[in-house]
Image (cartoon, helix red, strand yellow):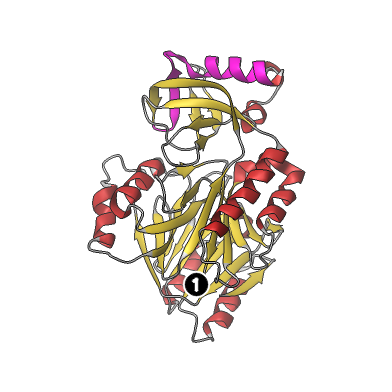
């Protein structure tokens, strides 16, 4: 693996970085992680991406990560030295899209194994259903890691990089001919629940136990925190109290409320199935940082002890950095321990599967991949 880093975030520097890496014949593909504040436009990126002579997978994120450095502007260009195959699945918000069929077109009779890198438009409406289909079609054949790209500033724009240009409402996936370990941890603990989701539309919970969702959420959060929603910004209270959905064989899946409606409904990050059961969770800086370190150890435990210098790839939830604030540097230090090539991004939802359990679209979670090569 070779890495070029530009901290200015210009298109000219991106172009130069890729050109430098591609001079080496061992580079078989490019992974591009770019900050949203770079302001890249399709009119300049699309013709350039179309001209690239190797497969490319990339995304535009709120922040990118290099070692313990969190960049709010800049681009990482990674020269992939393993065999890579990239493909795109579109229509991630289309209620009529059959993701099982769309994925089967790419994995039909696939008997390979290795690592699957999956980048999605983090604001698509059916990412959870897409990840479910990924498990249905691929199962535990691959280990996968990825997350949601996109801007926190409206309006939505294309945020995924392909050889065909920038795209949105899609998933861009890369099959990498390398083994890896994947750790998925969050550090949040149950304070109340469980509650049945008795009314839901996409990612908006209408009722819990047949009561307006916010009523139950408000009562539990105020009792635990000693604070009142009336006296605080909703998002500040919600950042420290996500929902947890229990799924067999995996880390509890988190879904953070981001908007309260006048009718008592709560819009969350990620889909929550009807009739599922949710808990209300809480955590602090120490528990989250500790969990990030545990994710790294979990990934390490899955690699052959003879593996030398594995490449750490971090997909960390943007909501974690918003909650941790100045303590987020501790989280980066926790996942950088013993590894000096860390790359990654702050993402809008996380994807991680270690080959041992069900797959989910996570939120407010740390996903660490350790790849034997990249």
- Residue located at (38% from left, 31% from top): 273
Nearest to the observer: residue 364 or residue 373: 373
Label 1 SS:
strand
- Residue located at (45% from left, 77% from top): 52
Extent of the magenta region: 202-224
Q: In which quarter of the image is residue 290?
A: top right
Tell me if residue 227 comes above or below residue 176 in the rendering.
Answer: above
Nearest to the observer: residue 7 or residue 332: 332
Tell me if residue 4 comes above or below residue 284 in the rendering.
Answer: below
Q: Quadrant of residue 140?
A: bottom left
Nearest to the observer: residue 192 or residue 356: 356
Q: Give left or right: position of 26 versus 13.
A: left
Tell whether position 210 is magenta.
Answer: yes
Q: Give left or right: position of 340 versus 219.
A: right
Q: Give left or right: position of 117 versus 79.
A: left
Q: Position of residue 92 (x, y in %)?
A: 36, 47
Tell whether position 301 is magenta.
Answer: no
């Amino acid at each position: 693996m070779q890495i070029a880093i530009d901290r200015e975030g210009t298109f000219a520097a991106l172009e130069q970085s890729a050109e430098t890496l591609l001079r080496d014949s061992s580079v078989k593909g490019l992974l591009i992680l770019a900050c949203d504040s770079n302001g890249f436009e399709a009119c300049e990126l699309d013709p350039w991406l179309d001209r690239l002579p190797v497969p490319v997978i990339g995304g535009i994120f709120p922040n990118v990560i290099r070692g313990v450095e969190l960049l709010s502007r800049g681009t990482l260009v990674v020269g992939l030295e393993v065999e890579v195959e990239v493909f795109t699945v579109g229509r991630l918000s289309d209620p009529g899209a059959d993701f099982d069929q769309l994925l089967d077109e790419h994995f039909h009779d696939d008997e390979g194994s290795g690592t699957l890198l999956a980048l999605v438009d983090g604001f698509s409406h059916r990412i959870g259903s897409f990840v479910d289909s990924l498990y249905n079609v691929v199962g535990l054949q691959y280990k996968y890691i990825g997350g949601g790209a996109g801007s926190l500033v409206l309006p939505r724009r294309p945020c995924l990089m392909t050889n065909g240009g920038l795209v949105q409402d899609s998933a861009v996936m890369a099959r990498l001919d390398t083994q890896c370990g994947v750790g998925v941890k969050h550090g949040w603990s149950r304070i109340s629940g469980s509650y049945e989701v008795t009314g839901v539309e996409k990612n908006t919970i209408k009722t819990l136990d047949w009561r307006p969702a916010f009523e139950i959420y408000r009562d539990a959060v105020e009792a635990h925190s000693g604070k009142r929603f009336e006296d605080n910004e909703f998002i500040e209270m919600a950042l420290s109290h996500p929902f947890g959905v229990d799924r067999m064989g995996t880390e509890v899946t988190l879904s953070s409320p981001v908007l309260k409606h006048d009718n008592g409904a709560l819009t969350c990050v990620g889909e929550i199935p009807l009739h599922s059961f949710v808990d209300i969770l809480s955590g602090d800086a120490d528990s989250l940082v500790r969990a990030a370190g545990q994710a790294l150890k979990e990934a390490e435990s899955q690699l052959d002890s003879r593996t030398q210098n594995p490449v750490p790839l971090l997909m960390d939830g943007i909501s974690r950095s918003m909650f941790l604030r100045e303590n987020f540097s501790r989280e980066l230090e926790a996942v950088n321990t013993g590894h000096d090539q860390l790359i990654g991004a702050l993402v809008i939802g996380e994807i991680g599967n270690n080959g041992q359990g069900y797959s989910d679209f996570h939120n407010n979670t740390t996903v660490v991949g350790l790849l034997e090569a990249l």
